[in-house]
Amino acid sequence: MSKAEMNGKKILITGGPTNEPIDEVMKITNMSTGSFSISLTEAFAKGGYEVTLILNKGVKYKDIPENVDLIRVETTDEMTITLALFFRSVYINFPIFHEPFFFRITVSNKNKSRIILF
């Protein structure tokens, strides 16, 4: 696929560990560093794709390319809700939630930061 054909293509990547609190002190997590998802993000961004990266808050990522939107999450619930809302915005007629709720997502990239409330 040529670079011209890639323009307008969107990629969604998730990365890093997800944490599940057991109590105020302990949590269940995994050993993911997020480095593979960051490498994928940079490769797709360099190729001209628009990339959304959903990444754990603890993973360090400083030099975010311009065409990358970064969403930070901590728990598996936050990851699940963020993905559900992302795909609901793509497929608006797909019912996901039966009860109203409020959820705040901060989307950041090199040039701007915006908050989306659901």
Image (spheres, rainbow, N blue to C red):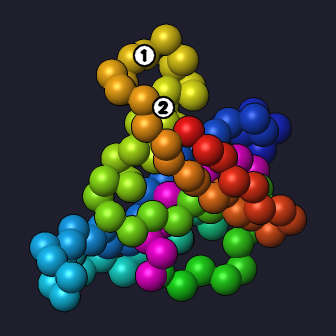
Q: Distance from label 2 to label 1 (Cα)?
A: 9 Å
Q: Nearer the viewer, residue 35 or 87?
A: 87
Mark 2–mark 1 CB contact (< 8 Å): yes
Residue 69 in view of the camera: no
What amino acid does circle 1 point to?
Phe
From the viewer's perspective, tell me whether residue 6 is left or right of residue 91.
right
From this view, report whether residue 6 is shown above or below residue 36.
above
Element type where label 2 sits in the image? helix
Q: Position of residue 117 (x, y in %)?
A: 61, 44
As drawn, which residue projects farthest toward the top?
93
Of label 2 and label 1, which has the lower sequence position? 2
* Residue at position x 20%, y 72% in the image: 21
| Residue beneath the point at 19% across and 88% down | 25
Residue at x 44% of width, y 82% of height? 58
From the viewer's perspective, is 23 left or right of 13? left
Q: Position of residue 43 (x, y in %)?
A: 61, 63
Q: Which residue is mark 1?
A: 94
Q: Indicate the amino acid at tag 2.
A: Phe
Is 111 on the left-hand or right-hand side of 54?
A: right
Q: Secondary structure at mark 1?
A: loop
Is 37 part of what is drawn in magenta? no
Give the camera-side residue of 18 and 106. Answer: 106
Query: Can you say which quadrant of the picture contains the N terminus?
Result: top right
Q: Residue 87, which numbered label?
A: 2
Q: Which residues are magenta?
A: 47-58
Rendering coords of residue 46 (x, y %): 72, 61
The C terminus: image quadrant: top right
Query: Is residue 37 shown above or below 85?
Result: below
- Image height of 84 relative to 108, above or below: above
- The residue that appears at 57% across and 28% down in the rendered structure is 89
Q: Relative to residue 33, is residue 103 drawn left or right?
A: right
Residue 5 image-quadrant placement: top right
